[in-house]
Every structure is written in C-alpha cells, then in structure tokens.
Amino acid sequence: MSELKPSLQPPIRYDSAIDLWLGFTLMLAPVVSAAIGIYLIRIGRVGDASYLFLTSLVTLLVTGIFCVPCRYTILHDAISIRCGILCYQIPLNEIRKIERSGSLKSAPALSTRRVRIQTEQREYLVSPKDRDGFIKTVEEHRERYFTATM
C-alpha cells in the first residue's frame, strides 16, 4: 500500500485546550450582568435590568466572535490557526523551531499549556489539547514537505 502524496494528505485538526480559570474569567462579566439584571427585575426596575441583559448579550457575542472556534489545522504545506474571526497561516517552510511553552503572552489560545512556533518574522503561541502530538505531527509534516519539494 503506497503512502499518499503530501498534497493529498487530509488535514489534521487539533482543538484548543481550555483552562478552567480562563473559561470562568471569560464568562464572569455576562453571568454577573445577568444575575444583577434578574435582581433588578425582582425589585421592579425592569428598564435598568434590560440594559444589563443587553450588556450581557453583547459581551457574550464579542467573546464568541474572538474565541469560537479555537482550533489548529495542519495542512500539507502550512499550519492554519483559527480563533474566532482571527485566522493565520504559517507555511511549514518558514517554521524555525517548535517547542512547548507556558507563556502568558496574548495569543489565539485558550490555555496556558502552549506550543511556541517560531518563524523568521515572529512567534505564534497555540494551545492544542495534545501538545506533544501536535508537535510530532508538525515535525512529520515538515519532513514530508521538505522531502516532497526536493
């Protein structure tokens, strides 16, 4: 049985790990706004409650727009990073180094258990659920890509 050509390899998707504390932090504002809104309804201040419900809804929408979905797809020639409306493509031939990281820098990642991808121009931080599997798969794809292009 022959191996598929690199360009015919199916994409491999890794979902982001999610830290409980980060999920809690992201949900805190909408939940508190809704809880205060319920309290205001109970004391007869329906107009004020509607502003809080609206604030809660807008906060949820903005959070969702920038966080859902958060995933990393390994293609035959690149890594595609998607976190909400943010999308990046990292060509495999531009990757200089890939390693585990615990950096707290801002990144399209929902966990602090991260992988650092270094290119000539910049670094990318991602947080796949299976960090070691992600690193291994990227390295295998890079090897195949370089073998296929030579």
Image (cartoon, grey):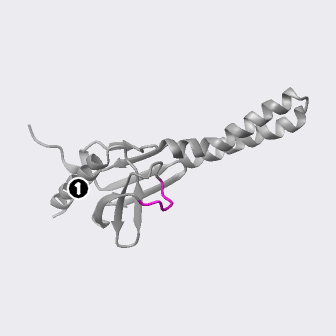
| Left or right, residue 6 beside residue 2 | right
Q: In the figure, residue 16 lies in which quadrant? A: top left
**Among all residues in the image, which is located at the extreme top?**
42
- Residue 44 rendering spot, x and y as whole percentages: 91, 29
Quarter of the picture holding the N terminus = top left
**Among all residues in the image, which is located at the extreme left?**
1
Q: In the figure, residue 89 lies in which quadrant? A: bottom left
**Residue ID at (55%, 50%):** 85
- Magenta part, dominant SS: loop
Part of the protein shown in magenta: 103-108
Q: Nearer the viewer, residue 62 or 94?
A: 62
- Residue 70 rendering spot, x and y as whole percentages: 47, 45
- Residue 105 rendering spot, x and y as whole percentages: 48, 62
Q: Quick check: can you spot residue 1?
A: yes
- Please name the residue that numbered disc 1 is placed on: 139
> How many numbered marks does the figure carry?
1
| Left or right, residue 36 beside residue 119 | right
The 10 Å Cα crowd at callout 1, few under 14, some 14 to 19, many 20 or more, is some
Q: Nearer the viewer, residue 150 or 35?
A: 35
The answer to if 72 sits in the magenta stretch is: no
**Residue ID at (57%, 49%):** 66
Kindly state the secondary structure of the residue where label 1 is placed. helix
Quarter of the picture holding the C terminus = bottom left
